[in-house]
């Protein structure tokens, strides 16, 4: 799992592109973008840049929301 979070929407898109260009580990990797910008155009940009999924979170809640999402996935 690679979690990407950036202060500005365009930085999150750039980080997704960079992370997606990394060599995949055996079995591949999942790229999760954490963002504060929830507009459809931005979310489309994240997916086009390589994000497999996204979470729209309030500033400061990124860590807690990510922990909750991982706990749900582990069920």
Image (cartoon, rainbow, N blue to C red):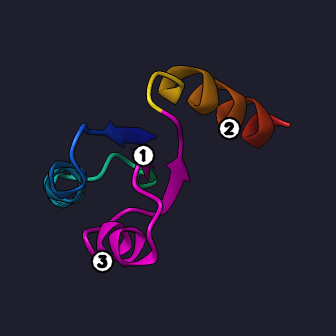
Q: Secondary structure at mark 1?
A: loop
Camera-side mark, 3 or 1 = 1
The residue segment tinted magenta is: 32-58
Q: Residue at x 53, y 50 (%)?
A: 56
Q: Between disc 2 and disc 1, whose residue precedes?
A: 1
66 displayed left or right of 2: right
Residue 62 place in picture, x, y as percent: 49, 29
- Residues under labels 2 and 3: Cα distance? 22 Å
Q: Residue at x 24, y 37 (%)?
A: 7
Label pair 3/1, CB-CB below 8 angstroms: no
Give the class, few, some or many, for how many residues have Cα within 10 Å of label 2's Cα (few <14, many ≥20): few
Q: Which residue is mark 1?
A: 36
Residue 8 place in picture, x, y as percent: 21, 46
Q: Which residue is mark 3?
A: 48
Residue at the right extreme of this rendering? 75
Camera-side mark, 2 or 1 = 1
Q: Residue at x 16, y 57 (%)?
A: 10
Q: Which residue is mark 2?
A: 69
């Amino acid at each position: 799992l690679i979690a990407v979070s950036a202060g500005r929407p365009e930085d999150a898109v750039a980080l997704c592109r960079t992370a997606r260009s990394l060599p995949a580990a055996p079995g591949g990797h999942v790229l999760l973008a954490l963002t504060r910008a929830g507009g459809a155009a931005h979310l489309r940009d994240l997916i086009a840049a390589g994000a497999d999924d996204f979470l729209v979170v309030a500033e400061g809640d990124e860590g807690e929301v990510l922990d909750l999402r991982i706990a749900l996935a582990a069920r």
